[in-house]
Amino acid sequence: MSIFSIADDKHIPLYRVMWIAATPHFCGEDDCDCEGKYEIRLEQGEAVWASGVDRDEMLKALEHWHGGAETPEEDW
């Protein structure tokens, strides 16, 4: 098992991930490049923006890395 997962064409070390957004970004700004993407917040205030597929893969990788801990079911 790798300690990396890919988001936004970057290999992200799993231990740097602080949280992952459950809903896509929407700010309404005309020049925003992140609309519809999910924020993956990293330590030290950094963030990457991921597609829904990349976000789901990151969540799976984190769950596996932490020993397959069960997470509460969410209604999507």
Image (tube, grey):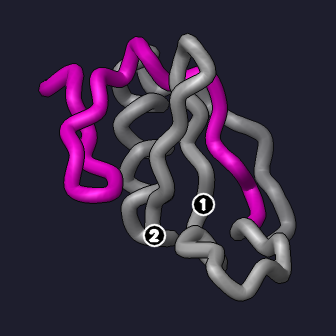
Instruction: Please tell me whether residue 32 is drawn above or below residue 14 in the rendered image.
Output: below
Q: 45 and 63: which one is in front?
A: 45
What span is in magenta? 1-23
The picture places residue 61, in percent across and down from the top left corner, at: 35, 37
Q: Is residue 42 left or right of residue 54?
A: right
Q: Earlier in the sequence, mark 2 or mark 1?
A: 1
Identify the residue position indicated by label 2 in the image. 51
Q: Quadrant of the C terminus?
A: bottom right
Q: Residue at x 49, y 56 (%)?
A: 49
Q: 50 and 28: which one is in front?
A: 28
Q: Residue at x 70, y 50 (%)?
A: 21
Q: Residue at x 41, y 45 (%)?
A: 58
Q: Residue at x 46, y 26 (%)?
A: 68
Residue 46 within the segment the image draws in magenta: no
Identify the residue position indicated by label 1 in the image. 38
The picture places residue 1, in percent across and down from the top left corner, at: 14, 25
The picture places residue 13, in percent across and down from the top left corner, at: 29, 22
The picture places residue 66, in percent across and down from the top left corner, at: 45, 16
Local packing at callout 2 (Cα closer than 10 Å; few below 14, some 14-19, many 20+) is some
Circles 2 and 1: CB atoms closer than 8 Å: yes
Which amino acid, by three-letter code, is at mark 1?
Answer: Tyr
Local packing at callout 1 (Cα closer than 10 Å; few below 14, some 14-19, many 20+) is many
**Residue 43: quadrant of the picture:** top right
